[in-house]
Image (spheres, rainbow, N blue to C red):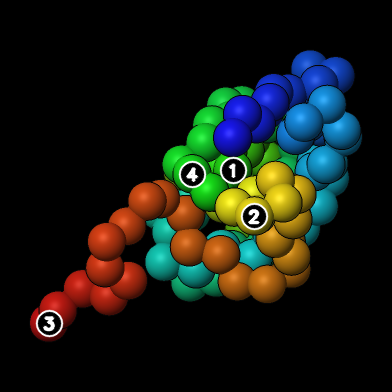
């Protein structure tokens, strides 16, 4: 199945299959991250820097800032949504839920 993924309007939108699917200017909650010193970052997305596919996930790196401490920069890879294997339909993740940046094989570090 072929899926078209690209950025529109200088990184303001993620387009999936030629449809504006994910905008910036949303607040993302990041946990287990290295973006800033906050345990849980309230990250305001300002622009998509890079997008890609790790089938069936659509992922991206987003520029923005933590509204708690003011740190700014670019996130590691975040899952932005998933494509249904059966229908090819894209479903965006809920930005206000907790997200763990970076492709990981383990969520916790053993002590």
Q: Which mark is residue 81?
A: none
* Residue beneath the point at 46% across and 41% down: 54
Point out the frontmost of discs 3 and 4.
4
Residue 93 location, quadrant: bottom right
Q: CA distance from mark 4 to mark 2?
A: 13 Å
Q: CA distance from mark 3 to mark 2?
A: 41 Å
Point out the frontmost of discs 2 and 1.
2
Query: Which of disc 2 and disc 3 is earlier in sequence?
Result: 2
Residue 85 appears in view: yes
- Residue in the foreground of this view, choosing between 28 and 83: 83
Q: Residues within 10 Å of mark 3 (few under 14, many from 20)?
A: few
Point out the frontmost of discs 4 and 1.
4
Q: Which mark is residue 58?
A: 1
Query: Which of disc 2 and disc 4 is earlier in sequence?
Result: 4
Image coordinates of residue 1 in percent, x first then y, are 59, 35
User: Are the residues tagged 4 and 1 within 8 Å (C-beta)?
Assistant: no
Secondary structure beneath disc 1? strand
User: Are the residues tagged 4 and 2 within 8 Å (C-beta)?
Assistant: no
| Total marks placed | 4
Instruction: Identify the residue position indicated by label 3 in the image.
Output: 111
Instruction: Identify the residue position indicated by label 4 in the image.
Output: 55
């Amino acid at each position: 199945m072929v899926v078209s993924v690209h950025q529109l309007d200088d990184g303001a939108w993620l387009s999936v299959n030629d449809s504006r699917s994910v905008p910036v200017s949303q607040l993302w909650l990041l946990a287990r991250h290295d973006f800033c010193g906050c345990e849980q970052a309230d990250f305001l997305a300002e622009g998509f820097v890079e997008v890609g596919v790790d089938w069936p996930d659509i992922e991206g790196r987003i520029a923005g800032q933590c509204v708690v401490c003011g740190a700014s920069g670019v996130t590691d890879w975040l899952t932005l949504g998933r494509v249904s294997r059966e229908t090819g339909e894209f479903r965006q993740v809920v930005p206000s839920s907790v997200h763990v940046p970076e492709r990981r094989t383990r969520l916790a570090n053993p002590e």
